Amino acid sequence: MQKVSGFFVVMMQRYLPDPWLFAISLTLVVFLMGMVLTGSSALDMVEFWGAGLFGLLEFSMQMVLVLVTGYVLARTRVVRAALEAVARRAGGPASAIIITTVFATVASFIQWGFGLIIGALLAREMALQVRNLDYRLVIASAYSGFLVWHAGFSGSVPLVIATPGHFLEDAVGIIPASETIFAPYNLAIAGVLLVTLPLLNRSMLPPVEDRVVVDAEVLRESEPEEDRSRPATPAEWLEKTPWLSGIIGVAGVVYLVAWFAGGGGLNLNIVILIFLIAGIILHVTPRSYLDSLRESVGASAGIILQFPFYAGVIGMMGDSGLIEVIAGWFNAIATPATLPFWAFISGGIVNFFAPSGGGQWALQGPVMVEAAGQMGADMGQVAMGVAWGDAWTNMVQPFWLLPALGIAGLQARDVMGYCVMALLVSGVIITAGLLLLT
């Protein structure tokens, strides 16, 4: 396993471009595919691209808020103290890899932004406290937990189709989370990955002489310092008083209790609100929250820049009819029993060009729903097939790796070789689950 992963590490270090160049390259690929496969002219494709650039602004803002609120919550003193306590329990590099993977996987299932950030922060803490730990692998291990995000509580596809008024409600109605997130087959796939990924990452630990170990002092110097000075002005007193945060926190909790007591369900906006309120309460003061917020915005910079370009790609794929062509290849050979699997494969391919769960569903969802309706396939299972495909190829699509890289101070090519191994192994597990359990 070390030799195989070592091969992919070398290949990624030599040939994987920066995520920004990756996005530009995919834009050109879709541009050419649209002309070749759909007969669209170059001018048509440019117009489709331009029209799509700002078509996901609302969803982009939701995604940034998911990431930012998860990041800020992970930076609270309570959560950071917990991370330090967890890292102290690692008996060596092997156990550090296993613990990091388990925590990142569970956290990603709870909330994807929280999982991305808490995984990276725990990996950093492991590097501070565990000797001879390969820094690249522990960061990759944290990111591998992201594989389960779309099957969890913040999964875009299951939350969208569970939300009244969603854009496909006329075709599929409201599909509750009991038929997607909490469906036995979905929980089984996530559970097997929770056991398998830590063991896989542990098996890839390089020999001591080949490990990339960082200087703990250098990492400590990059940690932000907490402002513990006494307020000198009324404005500073307002920033450092816990009363304002407490009032907002209580209001948020009351609203959430009323929401769920009134029959409201879990959707994307409610997930954001939960982590927003939890972060405000645990940071205690507005100043502490604002300091972490500024830090989180920096971690989301790559996503903010690249999202419009991927929205442009989505525009080209949708308006040119390219998505129907790609989905049609798989729908033509699918049966009602195998459609969730082919939805998974096609979802994985589309995710290369549209690494946004909600954006991808907006693009691919109508095609898959139509196919499911014609075949009589289970709508919830087909939707989760797309969701698993989106999460699966994130292991080799560096877009969502950017926040973790910002925290770690690494480049995508440093960790992507290990992520390729996670892609290969998880592909077998997800395939088995969708074919045998649905």
Image: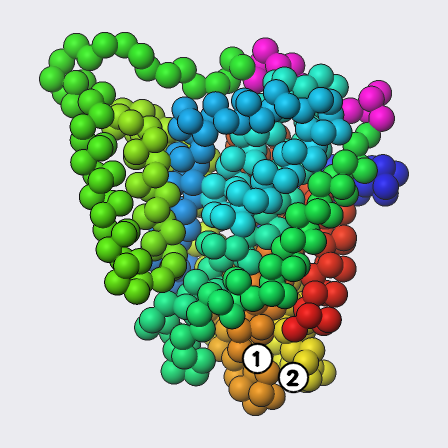
Q: Can residue 362 be seen by looking at this rendering?
A: yes
Q: Which residue is identified by label 2?
A: 336
What segment carries the magenta color?
Answer: 207-219
Which residue of the protein is positioned furthest toward the right in this rendering? 3
Where residue 190 sits, quadrant-wise, is bottom right
Lower sequence index among marks 2 and 1: 2
Q: Is residue 224 magenta?
A: no
Where residue 76 sits, quadrant-wise, is top left
50 in relation to 282, above or below: below
Q: Quadrant of the N terminus?
A: top right
- Circle 2: element type: loop
* Front position in the image: 143 or 241: 241
Residue 239 on image: x %, y %: 21, 23
97 in relation to 307, above or below: above
> Dot 1: few (<14), some (14–19), or many (≥20) neighbours within 10 Å?
some
* Front position in the image: 39 or 282: 282
Residue 217 on image: x %, y %: 59, 11
Q: Is residue 140 left or right of residue 221?
A: right
- Circle 1: element type: loop
